[in-house]
Image: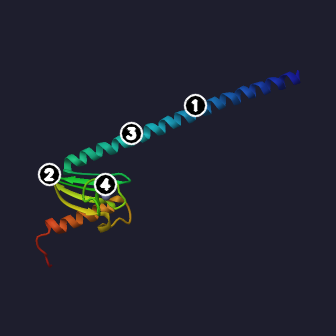
Amino acid sequence: MGKKMSENTVVELEELIRGNDVLLADRRSKTSQLQTLGRRLFSALLRKKKKVLEAETGVSVYASHDYSGMSCGPYRFYYGYEYTVCQTHGAGPCDCEDSEWAFVAWRGEDELLRIPASKLDTRLEVEMALLHGVGQFIKQFLVVEEVTL
Ligand SMILES: [Zn+2]
């Protein structure tokens, strides 16, 4: 009698454990699904915020690990791999070892300025090079007089 109860208890415990395993696996799966949904929702909110900001300010910025850019009004600025300056082949797209990534500024379709990476601050992220290029653009094209306070 006692032995049978003990066997029943073991079987019951095993079923309980299996049930818990299923429950745990189910919870892990649901947690993972919730995390994925959360990441997607967060990304969607960031994309929406970006669109709202672009509409409100007329300024658009973007960046990845190998390029960055900004557009504001008729001006566009870019730094990264898509535009190069090559000592051998000039400003056309070039993959040779003499080519460098470049900062480019446009007004409408007109390219106003192209600066090779060697003349930009590229110490940190691509945004730093973009910012340095925009600074050089402002100095060259927009600063018409020095103001002394
Ligand atoms: Zn080249």
Q: How many marks?
A: 4
Q: Is mark 4 within 8 Å of ligand 1?
A: yes
For numbered disc 2, what is the local secondary structure? loop
* Dot 3: element: helix
> Between residues 73 and 118, which one lies in front from this camera angle?
118
Lower position in the chain sequence, tag 4 or tag 3: 3
Q: Which residue corresponds to mark 1?
A: 26
Along the polypeptide, which appears first: circle 2 or circle 1? 1
Q: Amino acid at mark 4?
A: Cys
Q: Position of residue 138 (x, y in %)?
A: 18, 65
User: Picture coordinates of residue 18 (x, y %)?
Assistant: 69, 28
Residue for badge 4 = 94
Camera-side mark, 2 or 1: 2
Which label number is shown at residue 41?
3
Left or right of 24, for residue 106? left
| Residue 56 location (% of width, % of height) | 20, 48
Which residue is rendered at x = 79% and y = 27% of the image? 10
Q: Residue at x 23, y 48 (%)?
A: 54
Q: Nearer the viewer, residue 11 or 62?
A: 62
How far apart are the two marked residues, 4 and 3, measured between alpha carbons? 39 Å
